[in-house]
Each structure stands twice: as structure tokens, then as C-alpha cells.
């Protein structure tokens, strides 16, 4: 089987991880970067209860949170109108920035995964700003990527499935290079409560 090389990587992870080097350091340190829900994200107190069977609450009081301000975005750099940038899903903005950092060449196929869509309640610009299909389309448009572009959601396996699809595209000769990315931002307590109700989360968030 022909080897596939990873020639570039950039990321945003909890614990101030903003590069592949930072990520490696955190792994070596075994730093899990867990914290309580930040107060500037939302008021968590009304949603917490230690009883895991109490409906509509969560017994999980924390998680792993990106510390940078995701509302900061250079819309003009990416040729996006300010009003549309304000309505854009935060995952679109973040992936544009991270992809730019990781790759500056064009004509590259694109496979992306996306799960939660907390911004879907914003009606204006919905077709271009919060639609799942636009996650990869937005990136392929800006970076002039002409080959396949796919956005998919297979829940927790989404990131690995996108890697699998990209490898298939490379090995069949459909593509000579691919950009693969994954994103998941939880900006409201809804999904945490939902997953707690189904007993999907551990109380210690690990």
C-alpha cells in the first residue's frame, strides 16, 4: 500500500493549544486541560445538578474549552462582508483561519466534518453562514480548491471518517493532495444536557 505523508498540521485545542507543537507538548505533559464551564461562555449554574437522573440538567460540571476568543475574525482578509461574518458559524471562521495557517496552495481536495450547529438559529445568511454544506464549500472557494469537497457528520467518528475518505481519494488517484479537518464547538448547554440525559458523559469530563 502506498504510504501517505502528512505535510502540514495546524489546530486549536483546549489548554491554549494553537499549533502542532503545542499539542505535542500537552500530550507529553499528559495535560488534559479540563476546567469548569467558563463564565463568559454561559451561566452554567442553573443547568447543573449532581443527580445524573434529574431530567433537564447535567451532573457534568466541566469540559475542555478553547481559551481564545472565537468571536475575533478578520473578515476583510477572507473577503467576507462584516454582516455575514457576524452570522457565520464559529466553526467556519475557525477553520478558515486554521486552514490558512496549515496550507497556502490551491487546487487541493477538501474533506471536512462538522457536528453541532449552534449558530443555525441565526436566520440571515443561513444558506451561506450556518449550512453544513458550506463548511467545506467556504474553504474551497477562498483557497481555490477545485477537487472534491465533502462535509459530513458521523457523530464522534466524523474526524476519522474524513481522514479515511481523503486517503481513499489519494490512493485511487482521484486526488494528489487533500486537506482534512474536523471541528466541534459547543457554545450552549443544550448538547451537554442532552448527552447527560442519555448518560453519555462522565461526571469528571475525562
Image (spheres, rainbow, N blue to C red):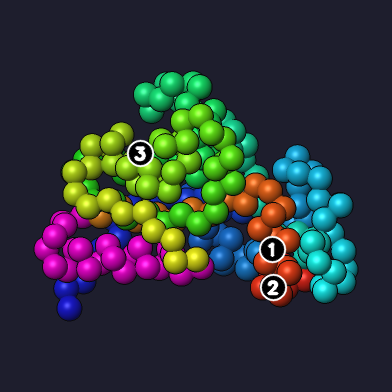
Magenta residues, dominant SS class: helix
Q: Position of residue 72 (x, y in %)?
A: 57, 30
Q: Is residue 16 left or right of residue 134?
A: right
Residue 202, quarter of the rendered image:
bottom right
Q: Residue at x 43, y 21 (%)?
A: 81
- Closer mark to the observer between disc 1 and disc 3: 1
Tell me the quarter of the image containing the C terminus.
bottom right
Q: Position of residue 15 (x, y in %)?
A: 64, 53
Tell me the quarter of the image containing the N terminus.
bottom left
- From this view, report whether residue 70 is shown above or below residue 159: above
Residue identifier under label 2: 198
Please give the range of residues in magenta: 156-177
Residue identifier under label 1: 194
Mark closer to the chain start, 1 or 3: 3
Q: Residue at x 65, y 47 (%)?
A: 187
Residue identifier under label 3: 138
- Residue at the far left: name it: 173
Mark 2 → mark 1, Cα distance in angstroms: 7 Å
Q: Residue at x 54, y 49 (%)?
A: 117
- Residue at the far front: name it: 123
Q: Secondary structure under badge 3?
A: helix
Mark 3 → mark 2, Cα distance in angstroms: 34 Å
Q: Are marks 3 and 2 in contact (CB under 8 Å)?
A: no
Amino acid at each position: 500500500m502506498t504510504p501517505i505523508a502528512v505535510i502540514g498540521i495546524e489546530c486549536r485545542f483546549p489548554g491554549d493549544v494553537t499549533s502542532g507543537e503545542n499539542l505535542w507538548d500537552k500530550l507529553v505533559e499528559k495535560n488534559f486541560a479540563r476546567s469548569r464551564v467558563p463564565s463568559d461562555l454561559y451561566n452554567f449554574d442553573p443547568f447543573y445538578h449532581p443527580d445524573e437522573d434529574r431530567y433537564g440538567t447535567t451532573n457534568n460540571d466541566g469540559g475542555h474549552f478553547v481559551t481564545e476568543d472565537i468571536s475575533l475574525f478578520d473578515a476583510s482578509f477572507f473577503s467576507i462582508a462584516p454582516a455575514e461574518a457576524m452570522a457565520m458559524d464559529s466553526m467556519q471562521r475557525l477553520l478558515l483561519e486554521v486552514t490558512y495557517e496549515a496550507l497556502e496552495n490551491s487546487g487541493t481536495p477538501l474533506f471536512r466534518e462538522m457536528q453541532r450547529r449552534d449558530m443555525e438559529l441565526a436566520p440571515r445568511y443561513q444558506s451561506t453562514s450556518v449550512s453544513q454544506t458550506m463548511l467545506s464549500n467556504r474553504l474551497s472557494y477562498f483557497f481555490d480548491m477545485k477537487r472534491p469537497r465533502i462535509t459530513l457528520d458521523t457523530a464522534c467518528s466524523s474526524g476519522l471518517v474524513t481522514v479515511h475518505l481523503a486517503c481513499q481519494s489519494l490512493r485511487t488517484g482521484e486526488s494528489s493532495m487533500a486537506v482534512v479537518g474536523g471541528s466541534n464547538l459547543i457554545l450552549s448547554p443544550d448538547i451537554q444536557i442532552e448527552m447527560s440525559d442519555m448518560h453519555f458523559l462522565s461526571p469528571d469530563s475525562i
